[in-house]
Image (cartoon, rainbow, N blue to C red):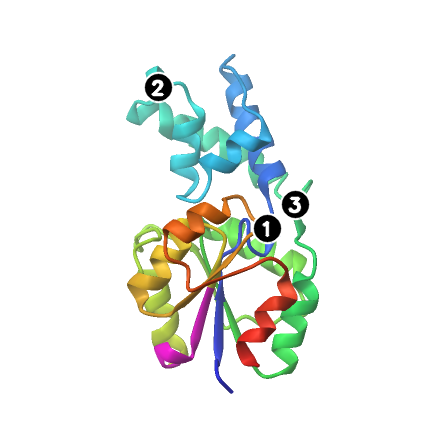
Amino acid sequence: MRYELVIFDLDGTLLNTIGDLAEAANHMLRLRNLPEHDYATYCTFVGNGIMRLVERALPEAWRTTEQVAAARADFLAYYIDHIDRYTKPYEGIPTLLATLQAQGVRLAVASNKFQAGTEKLIRGFFPEIHFEEIFGQRPEVPLKPDPAVVEEILAKTAVARERVLYVGDSGVDMLTAHAARVRGVGVSWGFRSREELQAAAADRIIDHAEALLEEWA
């Protein structure tokens, strides 16, 4: 088998989460009587963790340490209770995961979403799929594109780098793959553009989920 392990990003790769992220951020803004943003704008805000999402959503004058921390708390309080209202898997993802699992490929998740949210979504949407590790943002681990989370997965699974695929929708994901010295596959259906993936030197870009299976051809 050419690849033994596939590490997936979550938001914009496995799940379309932008609706619930946008609703939670706009809820936080409404509490402060601040202007809201549309879904397209939020696609440019996500990818670097909740703190950066909240910071980007706030007007510049509100981006003090104290105000961002308070806004993040309001965001999380709403989001964790409404995390799967609009969220859904991208077309073909459930079948892809089931196919890889049936073929004996090991699976993992490496996300910049906070840990509790990452686990809740993966367990809720993919209960029949076994993931070796499900890692979100944790206080002691740097966010992607730092490769620490991928390195942790590699250490726990003992899979050689040349037998690992990293799959994500953003330049951050491709930079993470490069930093970890694994093959980076970009997906065009997520929150970021094909141009961003190309600029980040994705090893390959795919346009539909089943195309990932060609990596084993």
Asked if residue 160 is among those painted magenta in the image, a careful observer would answer: yes
Decide which of tag 2 and tag 3 comes sooner along the chain.
Answer: 2
C-alpha span from label 2 to label 3: 29 Å
Decide which of tag 2 and tag 1 comes sooner along the chain.
Answer: 2
Which numbered marker is on residue 189? 1
Q: Position of residue 168 (x, y in %)?
A: 48, 57
Q: Which residues are magenta?
A: 159-166
Decide which of tag 3 and tag 1 comes sooner along the chain.
Answer: 3
Q: Position of residue 114 (x, y in %)?
A: 45, 48
Crowding at label 1, few (<14), some or many (≥20) Cα neighbours within 10 Å?
many
Say which residue label 3 marks.
87
Label 3 sits on a secondary structure element that is loop
Of tags 2 and 1, which is closer to the observer? 1
- Please indicate whether residue 122 sits to the left or right of residue 147 in the image: right
Q: Is residue 1 above or below residue 96?
A: below
Q: Is residue 107 above or below residue 118?
A: below
C-alpha span from label 2 to label 1: 30 Å
Q: Position of residue 102 (x, y in %)?
A: 65, 81
Of tags 3 and 1, which is closer to the observer? 1
Name which residue lies at 50% across and 44% down. Answer: 192
- Please indicate whether residue 67 sits to the left or right of residue 84 in the image: left
Query: What amino acid is found at the position of numbered circle 2 in the picture?
Result: Glu
Name which residue lies at 37% across and 65% down. Answer: 150
Q: Nearer the viewer, residue 33 or 184?
A: 184
The quadrant of the rendering that contains the C terminus is bottom right
Which numbered marker is on residue 88? none
Q: Nearer the viewer, residue 58 or 119?
A: 58
Label 2 sits on a secondary structure element that is helix
Asked if residue 139 is among those painted magenta in the image, a careful observer would answer: no
Query: What amino acid is found at the position of numbered circle 3 in the picture?
Result: Thr
Say which residue label 2 marks.
60
Label 1 sits on a secondary structure element that is loop
